[in-house]
Amino acid sequence: MGKYSAVKIRKDANSLIVFDLISERPYSGEELASRVGLTRKAVWKMIKKFREYGIVVEADKRSGYRIVRKPKLNPFDVAAIAFKNLRELVDEVWYYKMVDSTNDAAKRHRKPSILFFAEVQTSGRGRLGRTWSSGPGGLYFTITLQPKIGLEEVPKITLLTGLSVAKAVNGKIKWPNDVLIENKKVCGILCEVQGEMERPLVIIGVGINVENELPRDLEGAGRLVDFSNYDVISVFNSVLKNFYEHYLKFERGEWEHLRKEIIELCSTIGKNVRIQLPSGKIEGFATDISKEGALVVDGKKIFAGDCIHLR
Ligand code: BTN
C-alpha cells in the first residue's frame, strides 16, 4: 500500500477550473486565486503540480500563467473526460503514471464512484490468473460502482461494458468479456466484486490495446492502431460515453434492449465453441445470450467460463 502515488482529482477540484482557464488564455496568479478562492501560494503549488505532469506552463511577468503545451495523456484532461461522460457515476479520478493494477488499486481503496486510470501497469491482471500486458500506449482503467443489484447481475455489467467498447472501436463482443477486431483480441474486461453479496462493490477493469507494444508470443491479440487511426484519449472518451448510456439503461431495467444490442454484436453466437468450466470442457453450438447474460450452448445456459471459438 502507498507504493504507487496517484493524483487524486475530485469532481469539484479547483485544479480543473484553473487548468481550464489557463488553457484558454493567460491569467495572473492573483486573478486565478480570486476565481477559485485560494491564496496565490496555493495557485503556485497547483502550477507546480501541472508541471510535474509534463504540462508546460508559461509564466509571463505581465500576462501571467498559460498552458502552452501538454502531453496528450495527463491527469487533468483524463479527469475532465471522466466527469463529463460519467457524470453522477463518479466523483473522483485517481491517475497513476504507474501502478501494479488499477483493479488492485480499486480493491485496496474499497469505495464506489471512483475511476482509477494508469498510463502503465506493472502487474496488469486478466481473467483466470492471467497477466495483462500493460505497457505505455495502452488504455487501462477501472470504475467502481455500487448499484442496487445482487451478485447474479454482475455478468450483465461485464457484457454492457463489452458493448460500450465494441461500439467505440467497431469491434465484436466475444462472450463473456473480450472485444475482437478481425478476430484479434483488442480489449479485455475484468469485473470483480467485493463486499456483501446483496450489494457488492463492482470493480470494472478495462484494458484496451491501442498503440502499446505487445509481447511477440501473445497469440490472437491485436492493437487498435493496426486497424485504424486511434488514440488513447479519444477511445477513452467514446468508451465512457457509451458506458454511461448503457449503464443507465441497465439501472432503469432496460436490460432486454441492451441484450438485443449485445446479441447483434456478439461474434460467439452462431459458432461452435469449446468452453472450459471448472468441472471440465463442453463443446457445442452457441445460439443465444439468455436473459441472465448466460451463453446458450446446445440449449444449455453457461454462466461463466473460458470460451474458444472453434470456427
Ligand atoms: C482479460 O481479458 O482477461 C481481462 C483483462 C483486463 C485488463 C484490465 S486493464 C485495467 C484493469 N486492471 C487490471 O489489472 N486488469 C484490468
Image (cartoon, rainbow, N blue to C red):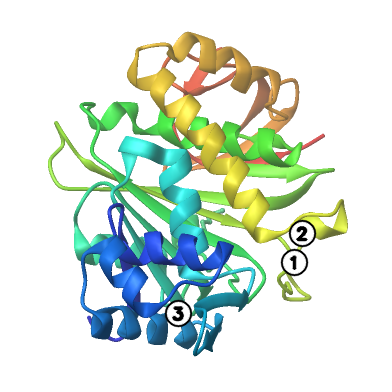
On the picture, is 82 further left or further right than 237? left
Identify the mark nearer the N-term, 1 or 2.
1
Residue 99: quadrant of the picture? bottom left
Identify the mark nearer the N-term, 1 or 3.
3
Quadrant for the N terminus in the image: bottom left
**Residue labelled 2 has its Cβ within 8 Å of some atom of ligand 1:** no
Q: Which mark is residue 223?
A: 2
Q: Which residue occupies 45% across, 79% down? A: 50
- Which residue is identified by label 3? 50
Quadrant for the C terminus in the image: top right
Q: Which mark is residue 295?
A: none
Q: Nearer the viewer, mark 3 or mark 2?
A: 3
Q: Amino acid at mark 1?
A: Glu
> Is there CB contact under 8 Å for labels 1 and 2?
yes
On the picture, is 116 further left or further right than 13? right
- Which residue is identified by label 1? 211
Q: Secondary structure at mark 2?
A: loop
User: Residue 143, percent across and down?
Assistant: 38, 49
Q: Residues within 10 Å of mark 2 (few under 14, many from 20)?
A: many
User: Residue 282, percent across and down?
Assistant: 58, 33
Q: How many marks?
A: 3
Q: Is residue 42 or residue 102 the one in the foreground?
A: 42
Q: Amino acid at mark 3?
A: Phe
Identify the mark nearer the N-term, 3 or 2.
3
Q: Amino acid at mark 2?
A: Arg
> Is there CB contact under 8 Å for labels 1 and 3?
no
> Is there CB contact under 8 Å for labels 3 and 2?
no
Q: Which residue occupies 53% across, 71% down? A: 74
Q: Which residue occupies 38% across, 59% down? A: 17
Q: With respect to residue 248, does 200 lie above or below?
A: below
